[in-house]
Amino acid sequence: MHKVKILFFATLRDYVGLKSVELEIPFGMTVIGVTEKLIETYPGLDKVKDMMMAAINREYAAETEVIPEGAEIAFFPPVSGG
Amino acid sequence: MDLPTVISLTESELDLDALLAQITLPTTGASAIFTGMVRGQTSSNNAHETIYLEYEAFQPMAETKMRQVAEEIRKKWPSIEGIAIVQRIGRLYPGTPTTLIACTSAHRNTGVFEATRYGIDRLKEIVPVWKKETGLQGEEWVEGHYHPKPGE
């Protein structure tokens, strides 16, 4: 197991009720695995899972990407700046 | 000479003249500036009034991605001299400029319009900034549509 930091932004933060949380995850877990684990803990996320994008260490990540040790994983909806 | 690139995520009012001055070189003869502002009245589909928008950013990643947009512009239009990419965050009211993209070059016909257009389009695709709209009916997050590819 290793510890990762999860950040939530915009509407996802509203659904979770937290800006960030630390999580213990097994080695080899992918973005999908983390997403499923988060939905278990914060069921409100189930409604918005289709819009959940992930950035690992500030770079857009594929769902199948394995989480590196000690990573920072940000979850957020498609961006709407400008 | 180093070509000036101004990247800024700020809570302060945008100073268009000062930003333009920062990307103007002795060789510069043209600039295309795009600025977006908070629209108070939306008349197209889903007509409504906006009281204010609240912008938030994932700051370190947003700055990295803004820098990436500038690099992409330089690759596509090598004639561009200066680039400014600015996003304002915080609570912003109708009529207020929220973003500025500006590119400079020696002449107007060397891609400066296209480069600026590309800059705002890319900012809206990959820079992690979100806005929540407060209107007469309450508040609602504005949702984007683009899903960047891994590493994009």
Image (cartoon, rainbow, N blue to C red):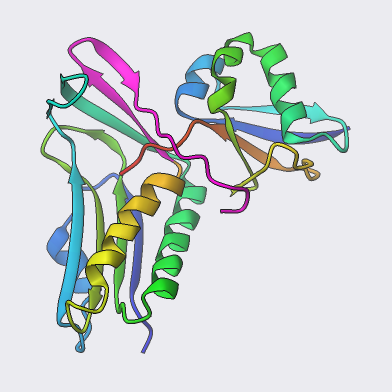
- Judge left or right: residue B77 versus residue B60: left
x, y (%) of residue B77?
A: 36, 75
Give the residue at x 22% y 66%. Answer: B113
Screen quadrant of the C terminus of chain A:
top left
Q: Nearer the viewer, residue B4 or B78?
A: B78
| Residue B133 on the magenta span | yes
Q: Nearer the viewer, residue A79 or B17?
A: A79
Residue B84 visible? The answer is yes
- Judge left or right: residue A63 versus residue B4: right
x, y (%) of residue B120?
A: 31, 53
x, y (%) of residue A80?
A: 37, 37
- Range shown magenta: B129-152
Screen quadrant of the N terminus of chain A:
top right
In the figure, A27 relative to B24: above or below? above
Give the residue at x 74% y 20%. Answer: A37
x, y (%) of residue A25?
A: 82, 29
In the figure, B19 relative to B60: above or below? below
Give the residue at x 18% y 82%. Answer: B107
| Residue B112 on the magenta span | no
